[in-house]
Amino acid sequence: MKFIIKTVIILAAITAIGVLVWWKLSPAAASRTNLHKTEVADIRALVELCTVEITEDIPVKGHVGPKHLFARQTVNGSISFDLDKLEITEDSDSALTVVLPPEIVEIHESTEPNSYEVIDVWNENLLGSAVMTTAQENAIKRKVCDNFRKKIYTKGYVRRARSEARSSLSVLLGALTGKNVTVTDPSPEGYYGK
């Protein structure tokens, strides 16, 4: 039964992708499509349920040795769930229990124009240079993104995403199978640090 449910979910995802491709390739699509050169860096399965998308401007404050940096950065993130990792138990002919898998939290720097702005740099040494290398700036930004990941959990974004995923999966799987579906969440606060 688990195989059938997962197959139905995968077929639904493939159908949605097919409709999107048809919509993009239809004759009217030429007027609503912008082409940009790109390079494919990663191909992943599209069997994910994305429940929360986050875009936030955050302060970037840090130092490398005596050099200090203060900037503003736009960060994008998402909280999703890998549907291949659903644990499905058939309780009876008319009931299913589904266990929500761990969340996938992705955070990356925005690539939009003006999404990163250095406000000030300085050096603690009186005659020292305040100029930072790209590697030094990136090291500070990585630390800030790691702190932002913690903030996503403390602000309740993960709790909300897990709650919405439970509701969405219950409705989706109930409609697909015609059964009463109970989605359980073993970690409503998320799996950060677990």
Image (cartoon, rainbow, N blue to C red):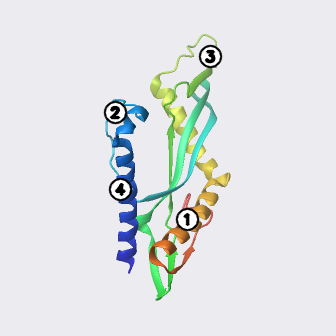
Badge 3 is on which residue?
125
Badge 4 is on which residue?
45
Secondary structure of the residue carrying numbered label 4 = loop
Q: Position of residue 68 (x, y in %)?
A: 61, 24
Of the pair 146 and 173, the residue shown nearer to us: 173
Cβ atoms under marks 4 and 2 closer than 8 Å: no
Callout in the foreground (3, 4): 4
Secondary structure of the residue carrying numbered label 3 = loop
CA separation, marks 2 and 3? 43 Å
Callout in the foreground (1, 4): 1
Cβ atoms under marks 3 and 4 closer than 8 Å: no
Residue 186 located left or right of residue 39? right
Above/below status of 14 relative to 24:
below
Whether residue 66 is visible to the viewer of this picture, yes or no, is no
Callout in the foreground (3, 1): 1
CA separation, marks 3 and 1? 56 Å
The residue under label 4 is which amino acid type? Ala
The residue under label 1 is which amino acid type? Ser
